[in-house]
Image: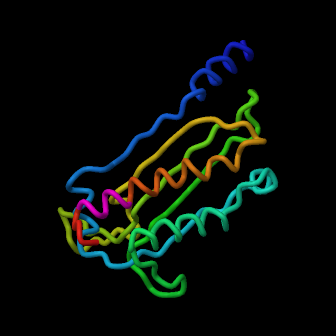
């Protein structure tokens, strides 16, 4: 039974699957945002030892945003809008691949419509997600997939105001 389950997981992970919360309304949520603070979730030591590090992801994201003309807030500045990047792994997979998820989200404070005295901090207002599987020896190749997800954010941000 375990081999059967592993085979299904392997087939499922053979091709990455993407999903996004990217509608006109979601995009409008960052219409007047001028700067973003970038937060990259730490990676497990096993992944960093295999060649993908949170600091490399941070640098890649900052570079992509700067090239697109999107301003990055100082990490110490009090910023209400985060571009949150998370790469999660299941390193103890029963198959030869590490299943992963890549998430890029815009997180910001949101007022609840039914009661505007309720403020929800750092709520996702735009996001893109991708799942797949990678061989541990090729984990650093995920940098390209992460950059692709950041490109989706950049395109969404520019769609709100093409002059950005």
Is residue 15 left or right of 164 when viewed as pictured? Answer: right
Does residue 65 sit above or below 48 in this rendering?
Answer: below
Q: Quadrant of residue 56?
A: bottom right
Q: Position of residue 88 (x, y in %)?
A: 62, 49
Q: Quadrant of the N terminus?
A: top right
**Residue at 56% over, 44% down:** 101
Q: Quadrant of residue 78?
A: bottom left
Give the main secondary structure of the magenta stretch: helix
**Residue at 39% over, 73% down:** 70
Magenta stretch bounds: 154-159
**Residue at 65% over, 23% down:** 10
Does residue 142 sit above or below 55 in this rendering?
Answer: above
**For this rendering, which residue is in front, 40 or 149?**
149
Q: Position of residue 37 (x, y in %)?
A: 47, 75
Q: Residue furthest left?
A: 114
How many marks do you count on the picture?
Answer: 0
Q: Position of residue 144 (x, y in %)?
A: 57, 50
**For this rendering, which residue is in front, 13 or 93?**
13
Q: Position of residue 164 (x, y in %)?
A: 29, 72
Q: Quadrant of residue 135?
A: top right
Q: Is residue 11 magenta?
A: no
**Residue at 76% over, 38% down:** 92
Is residue 84 left or right of 155 when viewed as pictured? Answer: right
């Amino acid at each position: 039974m375990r081999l059967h389950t592993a085979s299904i997981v392997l087939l499922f992970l053979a091709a990455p699957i993407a999903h996004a919360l990217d509608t006109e309304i979601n995009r409008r949520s960052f219409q007047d945002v001028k700067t973003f603070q970038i937060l990259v979730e730490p990676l497990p030591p096993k992944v960093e030892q295999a060649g993908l590090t949170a600091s490399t992801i941070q640098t890649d994201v900052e570079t992509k945003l700067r090239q697109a003309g999107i301003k990055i807030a100082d990490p110490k500045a009090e910023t209400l809008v985060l571009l949150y990047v998370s790469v999660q792994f299941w390193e103890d997979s029963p198959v030869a691949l590490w299943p992963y998820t890549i998430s890029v989200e815009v997180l910001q404070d949101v007022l609840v419509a039914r009661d505007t005295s309720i403020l929800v901090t750092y709520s996702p207002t735009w996001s893109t997600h991708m799942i797949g599987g990678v061989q541990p020896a090729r984990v650093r190749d995920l940098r390209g997939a992460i950059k692709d997800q950041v490109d989706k954010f950049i395109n969404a941000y520019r769609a709100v105001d093409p002059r950005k």
